[in-house]
Amino acid sequence: MSEERVPAEYTEMDLLEAKHFDKKVKENFMPAIISTVKQIIEDYGVLEGVCVDVGCGTAVFAIELCRHSKLKIYALEKEKAILKVARMNIEKERLTDEIIPVLGDAHDLPFENEFADFIIGRGSYHCWEDKVRVFKEIYRVLKKGGIGFVGGGFGRYVTEEELNRMKSLRDRSLKEDAKAYSSPDKLREVVYEAGISNFRIIYDKAGLWAEIKK
């Protein structure tokens, strides 16, 4: 879990930018985070064991998931400033025993084979330069009998007003990258190319997701 896992070929965000990003998420996208966690718990039960949150951002999602599960969550983020804010959020919520911030890259997950019972990758899919490689890494780290839930969306419990507002904000922010979350055929192709056979693609109001079982 060392810093060497993080590639050097990107411009680091400063702490002020990271705090602004955190504020934007909390002000605009909390309904989606609450909704998606509720959906996960409804579909998979109260989860226990080890979880990896791939591309955790400032750990807002990890904190909400932690509140509604018995998971020990490893919150992985490659951007140092973002991870620093994530650590602040985790400490503020007094969840330092339950959520472990990890500096690392999704393309080279710093975990042993069959490490995690549940792997979540929400909203970071569009950032992955080699999506096939990341899915291979997720499958490697997933335990037998484990579940991976990867993609993006707002969950099935948001209102139409919330959905339209957040989708508009996301699309304006991500621009061309937003198309990654409206291309189920492409996602299916990526997962299949990663050599994963036991999966299904979910594409509805809840968003676009690949559910992986090992």
Image: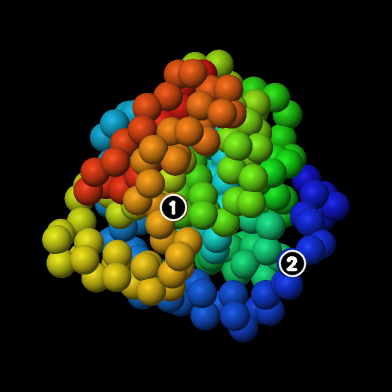
Residue 10's label in the rendered image is 2
> 6 above or below 195?
below
**Pointers 1 and 2 in contact (C-beta within 8 Å):** no
Q: Of helix, strand and loop, which one carries label 1? A: helix
The picture quadrant where one finds residue 169 is: bottom left
Q: Coloured how?
A: rainbow
Structural crowding at the residue carrying mark 2, measured as other residues with C-alpha within 10 Å and reported as few (<14), some (14–19) or many (≥20) = few
Residue 64 percent coordinates (x, y): 40, 53
Residue at horizontal 36%, vertical 33%? 201
Number of numbered discs present? 2
Q: Of helix, strand and loop, which one carries label 2? A: loop
Can you say which quadrant of the picture contains the N terminus? top right
Residue 127 percent coordinates (x, y): 57, 56
Lower position in the chain sequence, tag 1 or tag 2: 2
Residue 184 percent coordinates (x, y): 37, 41
Residue 134 versus residue 82: which sits nearer the camera? Answer: 134
Residue 89 versus residue 130: which sits nearer the camera? Answer: 130
Residue at horizontal 15%, vertical 59%? 159
| Residue 208 seen anywhere in this rendered image of the structure | yes
Residue corresponding to mark 1: 180
The picture quadrant where one finds residue 61 is: bottom left
Residue at horizontal 20%, vertical 56%? 158
Residue 3 percent coordinates (x, y): 82, 55
Q: Amino acid at mark 1?
A: Ala
- The span from disc 1 to disc 2 (Cα, nearest Å) is 21 Å
Q: Amino acid at mark 2?
A: Tyr
Structural crowding at the residue carrying mark 1, measured as other residues with C-alpha within 10 Å and reported as few (<14), some (14–19) or many (≥20) = some
Left or right, 65 with reference to 74: left
Residue 161's label in the rendered image is none
Residue at horizontal 45%, vertical 39%? 187
Residue 62 versus residue 149: which sits nearer the camera? Answer: 149
Residue 46 versus residue 146: which sits nearer the camera? Answer: 146
